[in-house]
Amino acid sequence: MAEKAAQQSASNGWDNQNKKSNSSAEGEKLVISLQRYVEAGQTWTRVRVHSDNMELAADIVQDMAKFFKWIELDSEAEFPDEYENFQQVSAMN
């Protein structure tokens, strides 16, 4: 019911019904947030997964894609520590 009201009250743009879930898996930071976007009668949902653990983030995205039967999705990833480790390993070769 609240979701329907939020959808009706949202004009074009991201609604203010940002839902976040915080958790700690093995002491690691994990934040999953969802936002609904409405434009010209179309509705999209933005899901953001924030984690310092690349493997954990990948597992979550893969599980969500399988559960929701997503065929296509856009994604961005930033793991500066992993990138730095990669640069150090590639410099050794």
Image: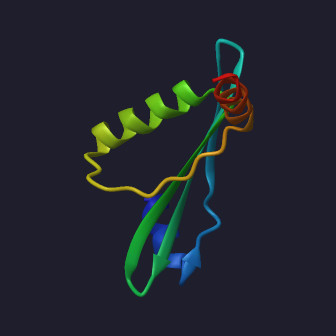
Tell me the quarter of the image containing the N terminus.
Answer: bottom left
Residue at figure coordinates x 37%, y 78% from the top left: 42
Tell me the quarter of the image containing the C terminus.
Answer: top right
> x and y percent of residue 72 in the render?
31, 56
Question: Which residue occupies the extreme top position in the image?
Answer: 26
> x and y percent of residue 52 in the render?
69, 30
Relative to the observer, which residue lies in front, 93 or 26? 93
Residue at figure coordinates x 73%, y 38% from the top left: 80
Residue at figure coordinates x 29%, y 50% from the top left: 70
* Colour scheme: rainbow
Above or below for 55 versus 45 = above
Rendering quarter of residue 22 = top right
Instruction: Give the side of residue 34 with respect to residue 60, left or right.
Output: right
Give the mark count. Answer: 0
Instruction: Give the side of residue 7 with respect to residue 23, left or right.
Output: left
Relative to the observer, which residue lies in front, 4 or 41? 41
Above or below for 35 versus 86 = below
> x and y percent of residue 81 in the render?
74, 31
Relative to the observer, which residue lies in front, 39 or 74? 74
Above or below for 69 versus 92 = below
Residue at figure coordinates x 70%, y 29% from the top left: 91
Relative to the observer, which residue lies in front, 19 or 59? 59
Above or below for 87 versus 92 = below
